[in-house]
Amino acid sequence: MEKVIQVLNRMQADGIIEKFAIGGGIAAIYYLQPYHTDDIDVFISPVILGQSGLVSLELVYGYLEKLGYLPVKEGVLIEDWRVQFVPAFAAVQEEAIAQARRVEYGETYTFIFSAEHLGAEFLRSGRLKDQVRVIDLIESKKMDLKVFRDIINRHGLTEKWKEFVSRYDLEE
Amino acid sequence: MSSKTFDPSKITVEDLFRAKKEWRQRQANLPFEEKIKIVKKLQAVVRTIRASIGEDRDKRTKNEAKHNEGKQDNEA
């Protein structure tokens, strides 16, 4: 994984991506017990639009291809990791990138969503496996619930949170 | 745990849940790099299982399949 981080840092230094942070399963593993995941989700900001007006990852993919890293499924295979680049569409994702934690890894460093932003993004995403991670983050006590509530309130996730609390019989 | 202190007949469901919770906490407190090593091992296990049941091969792209086959050769 260190090689992936080095590649991401190089991409940033070369101006291919401006800001990025790791979210998703790998970020969850930073705070929780390890579990199986195939991808590294790298959220990038700002979102780059192509000539057609649609989101374009052409620059990212083209740069990586020159380094010998080829596309696989929705991502790019860097060394033995499938890295998925996720343009930050939602405001909560953008804020998660801007306020990401700087984390050392081997001889290098990277950026990872804070536990509170990760929880909010999982709540926003809302897939079953994401909901499980929200509960795991709460139970792990790695998440400051006051900060988490502030994030979800500011990003229009209050109703989703109420539904979530009700569904899983949590204390609000 | 020695046989003197371990008596399976005295284990309660609460003991099992507590032990499981403690294990998860210990795992969560591992250094990040150690956790990633565990993830890599889990990926290898899942790859082996998927290969043994013939799943996944068709779903992956050629690039990934080629890469993973190379890895499995190295692991074997």
Image (tube, coloured by chain):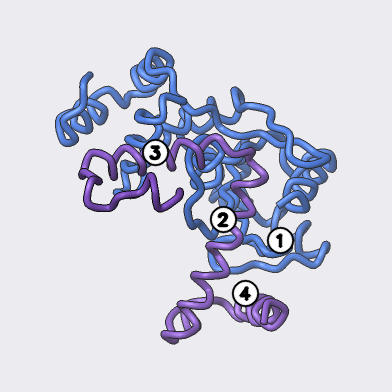
Q: Amino acid type of disc 4?
A: Glu
Residue B76 disc label: none
Whether label 1 touches label 4, CB < 8 Å? no
Q: Nearer the viewer, residue A33 or B50?
A: A33
- Which quadrant, please, contains the C terminus of chain A? top left
Q: Amino acid at mark 3?
A: Phe
Q: Give the camera-side residue of A132 and A13.
A: A132
Q: Residue at x 46, y 28 (%)?
A: A92
Coordinates of residue A23 in the picture (x, y in percent): 54, 40
Q: Nearer the viewer, residue B55 or A72?
A: B55
Label number found at residue B64: 4
Q: Residue at x 41, y 24 (%)?
A: A141
Q: Amino acid at mark 1?
A: Ile
Within 10 Å of disc 2 (Cα), the crowding (few <14, some 14-19, many 20+) is: many
x then y, percent, for residue B71: 68, 76
Asked whether the viewer can see residue A132, the reply is: yes
Q: Are dots 4 and 2 on a single chain?
A: yes
Between disc 3 and disc 1, whose residue precedes? 1
Specify the label residue A78 is tagged with: 1
Q: Chain of mark 1?
A: A
Asked if one can make out residue A123 in the rendered structure from this viewpoint, the answer is: no
Determine whether the residue tagged by mark 3 lies in a helix, strand or loop.
helix
Label 2 marks which chain's residue? B
Q: Which residue is mark 3?
A: A122
Q: CA distance from mark 2 to mark 1?
A: 16 Å
Which residue carries the number 2 mark?
B39
Mark 3 — on which chain does it sit? Answer: A
| 3 and 2 marks in contact (CB < 8 Å) | no
The reply to whether label 1 and label 4 mark residues of one chain is no
Q: Is residue B43 above or below residue A60?
A: below
